[in-house]
Image (tube, rainbow, N blue to C red):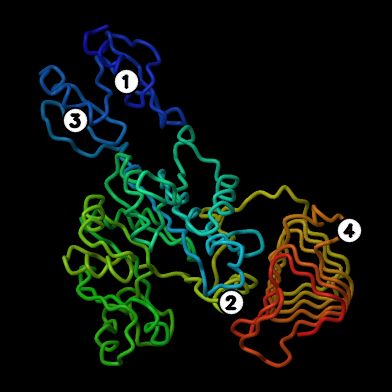
Amino acid sequence: MSAASKWLCKIAPHEGWTVLCTAPRGGVILQSHFEAQGGSRGLAPDASFIRPKLLPYFEPCQKFLHLTLVALWGYRKVKGDCHLTPSKRFQLTDRVACIILAGGQGTRLFPLTQHRCKPAVNFGGRYRLIDVPISNSLNSNMNHIFVISQYFSSGLNEHIKETYPLDHFQGGSLSLLCPEERPSGKTWYEGTADAVRKNLDALTSLPIDYFLVLSGDQLYNMDLEAMVQFAYEKDADLTIAALPVGKTQAPRLGLLNIDDDSNIVDFHEKPKDPAILEKFELSDEFVTCNDIHCCNPPYFLASMGIYVFKKEVLVSLLQEDSREDFGKHLIPTQLKKGKAAAFLHQGYWEDIGTISSYFEANLSLTTNSLGLDLYNEVLPIYAHNHHLPGARLTQTIVKDSVVCDGAVLEAKSVTHSIIGVRSVVKQGTVIEDAILLGNHTYTDVKDGTRDYAIGENCLIKRAIIDQNVTIGNNVKLTNAENLDTYDGEGIYIRDGIIIVTSGTTLPDNFTL
């Protein structure tokens, strides 16, 4: 074995490599953690298979300048030349850290956020809102994912750990970051940007070039890898995912103006002035060229709150601008510097901000025409495996609804509704335009005599029934007085929608 190979055998374990055995001509065969999961082994005659960060150690040795050096991170040292060029092994996503901001308190989603954070709210009968950004990240080959949480973080983190058992030996990592006690005192995040700033030590510990910043409570099906590739090819310091919207949505969102090369030339947060809105209307040429037909014209380009930053740009920005929020503060600051581009996304996207938007986003799943696509086998949305039997229906008429695992339906009818896992509905009951979030168990573990179920001959319309709720017989939840807001004991109305909160018991003949 050559002196160089012996030296490499000593330092390889510290650089994430395993020395398998010696190779012909005095070299060594190395294997990285990444390769152990399906990649090919690296045959390194005379220690030629090394990582880029090790190249400086070999530069003084002229004989290594004449070897083809292929590195794990995708660089090839061209024979006879010191220039590093991308190789076929290069995957841009290996150099990206995905940050999912899941610290939202979700006050506008109250009372669903009474005992959980916003990203942990159930969705679609068997998912949590956090499952959407994590699934999109995994589908887009993001190997390094960080979830930053704050409010009710224990429940969210438990769900993530049980649903996504990733580790370094499976070719990826999913790290959970939340406020912690430090020598300087207890940290507390004041906003999205502040959360990232206070976790920079962890976020910059990986050999990365880009940060992909996502929200933990948005719904979309998106190829995030294509967005990162777009940012790389544009050499943009900041890339913002942009969605065409109509005139009714535009005043509620941050609007972008771009040039012919997709460079962002202007930005305005939630403009209400008609004169300002007019300046952000998309040109007919842009609309025709990109085949935009999401709604009636005029069209506008809105920020989706999904960002790709160059690593050094984000670190510098967080140090330069000490304010706490990305959308309100740091994004406008960075846009003034230029080198920002817009990545056009045409597809479903919804920011779950209110009870009304949450309600409509759920019910859109019953027809699967305009809502989130949960039936895409290529780009699936992952969910916790509850290990439950299939739903059981007894003489129940079901129309335009989603019925999840473990549900037991003896109801008269279920129409345009979501029936979550372990939901139990008894005889004669009518469910219409409703969302049943399901249950953790069929009965109360502390009181075995209490079943989590909707009783007989009930009428449930335009309502959300949270987890672990018991509803007696002959109960009518219809909002007969058409109230927009109501606060009761364990039962509320928001945006005209009835919400029965987790753990509530409604007695026989209750009416609202």
- Relative to 98, 416 lies left or right: right
Q: Position of residue 345 (x, y in %)?
A: 38, 67
Q: Mark 3 or mark 1, which is nearer the start of the sequence?
A: 1
Q: Mark 2 or mark 4, which is nearer the start of the sequence?
A: 2
Foreground mark, 4 or 1? 4
**Gap in angstroms between the C-alphas marked 4 and 3:** 71 Å
- Residue that numbered label 2 is attached to: 360
- Relative to 20, 134 lies left or right: right
Check the image and report above or below for 403 versus 96: below
Residue 12, label in figure:
1
Q: Which of these two is toward me, 159 or 114? A: 114
Say which residue appears at 60% left-offset and 67% top-offset: 114
Residue 460, quarter of the rendered image = bottom right
Q: Mark 1 or mark 2, which is nearer the start of the sequence?
A: 1
Q: Which of these two is toward me, 268 or 262? A: 268
- Residue that numbered label 3 is attached to: 77
Could you say whether the residue bearing mark 3 is in a helix, strand or loop? strand
Q: Position of residue 150 (x, y in %)?
A: 48, 57
Q: Position of residue 20 (x, y in %)?
A: 40, 15
- Residue that numbered label 4 is attached to: 449
Image quadrant containing the N terminus: top left
Q: Which of these two is toward me, 290 or 509? A: 509
Q: Residues within 10 Å of mark 3 (few under 14, many from 20)?
A: many
Could you say whether the residue bearing mark 1 is in a helix, strand or loop? helix
